Image (cartoon, grey):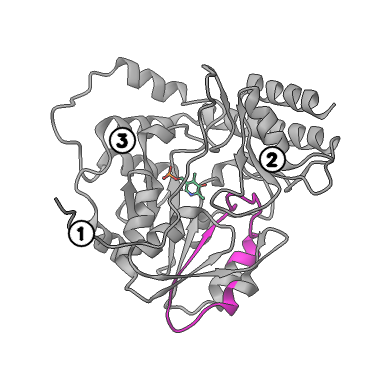
Amino acid sequence: MTTPNFKKFNIEAYKPGKSKVNNLKKVIKLSANESALGISPKAKKILSNKKFVLDKYPDGKSQSLRKQISKTYRCNIDKIICGAGSDEVIQMICQLFLNPKDEVVLPEYSFLMYRIYSKVVGAKVIFAKEINFKVSTNEILKKITKKTKIVFIANPNNPTGTYLTKKELIELRKKLNKKILLVIDDAYAEYMKNKDYSSGLDLFRNKENVFVLRTFSKIFGLASLRVGWGYGSKKIINALNVIKPPFNINGVAQLAATESLKDKKFIMKSIKHNFFYANNIKKFLEKYNIYSNPVSANFLLLNFEKCKYSAKFLHKNLKNKGIILRLTEDGYHIKNKLRLTIGSKKENLKFMNAVKQVMK
Ligand SMILES: *Cc1c(COP(=O)(O)O)cnc(C)c1O
């Protein structure tokens, strides 16, 4: 038998943050930037009490969810599209905008899905240097050519944890050719308490050439249900709706996402929790000469340059104790660093204790 021919892609497949350690039943997973406090009590309640209709197709337009999004974020319902994770919205944007040989400009250490979906549709990915692990708008502008169609920026950026200020973002949009789509991925926007930061949605909700991405996988704690959304001009949203898989968000996910948006108390609690522990853990690690980015989202990029042990050494020893961090060499190609997600109180204390033991 023969396998019919298929296309070959020169793509490094996405490797998710690990969640298992050989022969350990219980692990502490601090490798994928998921919610420290799980899902919101409001969403939990509806998931356990509601009788779901599972034998009928879900609402393909995610009408109630989009309505709640537009209410919570004071934005236009007709400019919202939902996806099975923001992942799927990234994929649809690439399908809609990119022809083979078009160019996409990305900061060198950006979220991996931008390069993967760009390459799937045959576009060329151009990387712009970062300076001290921060996106450089100048370096991005240097890489723009007549073929550039999209610039993707996650703000704050994963895995570096650094961010462009409100001023820098506005300036980037000003200097970028009007015909180039600027995609701003606000995946961690809710966590941000930094005064010089503004979300893409707050800055550009009325711009025709900016597209904003949001997700329910992070602060809202629904990573497994796969819900995200995009916000852009009506023209773009209408075109995306033509190529969108018809029932891309299942009914359970739509309801859970809608409820979690209403749970303001839980979101406030998550933000406070994150700020407290991110600052604490950062200071704690500095005692061992492990330095990290200024606190921003729910993760820290740990730098081992000045530490007596390497990132790999700590990673391995923590793993043996059932605590998993993300090795940034995988996929991102960042050497001697680890990405740490802020966990629950219990997880954070266990993590700090384990570091103490390994370091002595
Ligand atoms: C986690 C993350 C997402 C979320 O992806 P989903 O597909 O919505 O789970 C998007 N962008 C960035 C930069 C992320 O870190």
Does the magenta-highlighted stretch encompass residue 311? no
Name the amino acid, label 3. Answer: Gln
Q: Nearer the viewer, residue 35 or 1?
A: 1
Q: Are marks 2 and 1 in contact (CB under 8 Å)?
A: no
Does the magenta-highlighted stretch encompass residue 147? yes
* Mark 3, residue position: 254
* Mark 1, residue position: 242
Determine the CA span between mark 1 and mark 3. 20 Å
In the rendered image, residue 129, in percent from the top left (x then y), is placed at 63, 68
In the rendered image, residue 66, in percent from the top left (x then y), is placed at 32, 44
Q: Secondary structure at mark 3?
A: helix
Q: Count residues near mark 1 (Cα–Cα under 10 Å), then give few for <14, some for 14-19, many for 20+.
A: few
Q: Earlier in the sequence, mark 2 or mark 1?
A: 1
In the rendered image, which quarter is residue 254 located in? top left
Q: Look at 47% across and 44% down and name the residue there.
A: 15
Q: Look at 73% across and 60% down and name the residue there.
A: 132
Numbered tag placed on residue 140 in the rendering: none
Q: Secondary structure at mark 2?
A: helix
Q: Are marks 1 and 3 in contact (CB under 8 Å)?
A: no
In the rendered image, residue 259, in percent from the top left (x then y), is placed at 38, 30
Q: Nearer the viewer, residue 114 or 213?
A: 114
Give the number of the mark in front: 2 or 1: 2
Q: Is residue 76 visible?
A: no
On screen, residue 348 versus residue 227, left or right, reads right
Q: Nearer the viewer, residue 160 or 248?
A: 160
Numbered tag placed on residue 312 in the rendering: 2
Is residue 106 depicted above or below 352 in this figure?
A: below
In the rendered image, residue 224, in percent from the top left (x then y), is placed at 39, 33
On screen, residue 147 versus residue 65, left or right, reads right
Which residues fall within the magenta stretch? 140-169
Q: Look at 64% across and 53% down and name the residue there.
A: 334
